[in-house]
Amino acid sequence: MIVQVRRIRPAQRGHSIFLAFWLSVLIPISAMAAPYAAHVIDARSGKVLHSRNADTRLHPASLTKMMTLYIAFEAIRNGEITLDTKVRISKHAASEPPSKLGLRSGQRIALRYLIRAAAVKSANDAATAIGEAISGSEAAFSRRMNRTAKAMGMSRTTFKNAHGLTESGHLSTARDMTTLGRHMIYDYPQYYNLFSRQTADAGVKRVSHTNRRLLQSYKGADGIKTGYTRAAGFNLVASAQRRNERIIATVFGGKSTASRNARVAELLDMGFRRAPSRAALRKPARPAYAGNVASGGGATVAKTVRVIASVQKSLRPRPRPSPSVEVAETVVTAAVADGDKMQASVEAAIAAAAQSVAAAADETPKVEVADASPSSARALAPRPEARPAELTVALVKPTAAPPKPAEPEIVTRLSTSGGQYWGINVGRYGSRYQAEKVLLRTALAEMATLDGSLRKVNQTSAGFDANFVGMTRDTADLACRRLKARNVTCFMIGP
């Protein structure tokens, strides 16, 4: 740049000072403009559809919170913490700069609200509190973030904090962040709907999504995370689904929110054009669970319960001596001492018993049998009474004729639905796009009961009905009750 120096007249001095001020502001900003990088993939197969500077290490800004939330979901899955765990906010977390939820030092808040604040509002104090609650300190949590990133294959990423504010060495790439976004979608689909909520209850207040403009304007967009710092520029990892196709696009270094969103929309359109309509789903392999690592070594610290199956010590008391044993011992001792006397007593008892038997034999009366021949035996045997001369035999009715075989039932229509001809309605909307968007959002929010059902939009004169069909009556009733518990309008549709 050539700078021309000339004498300034007094009348021009005020203008020169004004010009010098703006040059001092604009030149550093332009010098700090972040490099541009982009990466687009087919989420189903992981195939790269477009890439530019995708491996350049840049500042990720709040895209970092995707890893913070991923580890939070991992910790919940492995029992380290629960959504209802009350997290105590530290002074360090409360002092984080905006964007923030406004938490106070010493305050206790459920983990679920911190997750919503980090995912929807991109709150830095909430992200720091999550890291401290899981690993004890933000530094230990950053080490766990790096281990998880390495296990995912994010080879050019280094995390230094849980929120993404600019810090020396805190760098990532567009390719690595796209990989992280794909893992978020397929590893924890039960939580992915957080990234499409335009507003959310964060406990202390209701927060709005930082990416609601793209969610509202781009058909099929359902997440996932924005990021901005002066050093990073305007970053975004976005995902959209249309029919069976899902595209993930990442942009680093946007100049503004509007230009970044426009560029992401172009990349998503490019992805849908280049992606095949049919592709095999190859979900990424979930990274190995690492847990927290103790500061003194490589041992993994986790909340585990050890169960020792072998019995080390019997708690059964010793049996108490039986009194009968002592009595028996006393009797035996007395018998041995008086052996001769007992022998005489036994012989006398035997003699008395023999005399009694002999006397009983003499007094028994004798029975004489007159005749033991067979004829006499027949004479003594009782004879049955004679049968009456006039005997009426009971009348036996003839057996009834067998029933005629029933006529075969003719089936005119065979149902192959297995009873799955019920459904539910989740609202009526002014356009087909709005109905499809609500169906997708509802399916992601209630995957437990709606998995396997079909999303169908019926056009009527009054509007477009958003329906889930192909369900049993019990499944439809359960799904409707669960949706109503989430404040979602719902009613069952019968056959």
Image (cartoon, helix red, strand yellow):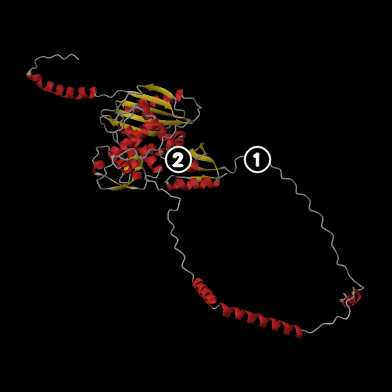
Percent x, y for residue 101?
28, 41
Task: Looking at the picture, tell me which residue is in the foreground, 377 or 458.
Answer: 377
Mark 2 in CB contact with mark 1 (< 8 angstroms): no
The label shown at residue 90 is none
Mark 1 highlights which residue? 414
Q: Secondary structure at mark 1?
A: loop
Percent x, y for residue 188?
42, 38
Question: As drawn, which residue projects farthest toward the right?
Answer: 389
Of the residues shown, which amino acid type is indicated by label 1?
Leu
Percent x, y for residue 260?
33, 27
Of the residues shown, which amino acid type is indicated by label 2?
Thr
Horizontal side of residue 295 vs 324, given as left or right: left
Mark 2 highlights which residue? 442
Depicted 341 relative to depicted 121: above or below: below
Q: Is residue 170 visible?
A: yes
Percent x, y for residue 277?
50, 26
Neighbour tally class for label 2: few under 14, some 14-19, many 20 plus, Cα within 10 Å: some
What is the spatial separation of the Cα atoms under label 2 and label 1, in whole angstroms?
A: 32 Å
Horizontal side of residue 395 vs 172, given as left or right: right
Horizontal side of residue 395 vs 177, given as left or right: right
Task: Looking at the picture, tell me which residue is in the foreground, 308 or 160.
Answer: 308
Q: Residue at x 46, y 32 (%)?
A: 283
Q: Residue at x 66, y 80 (%)?
A: 350
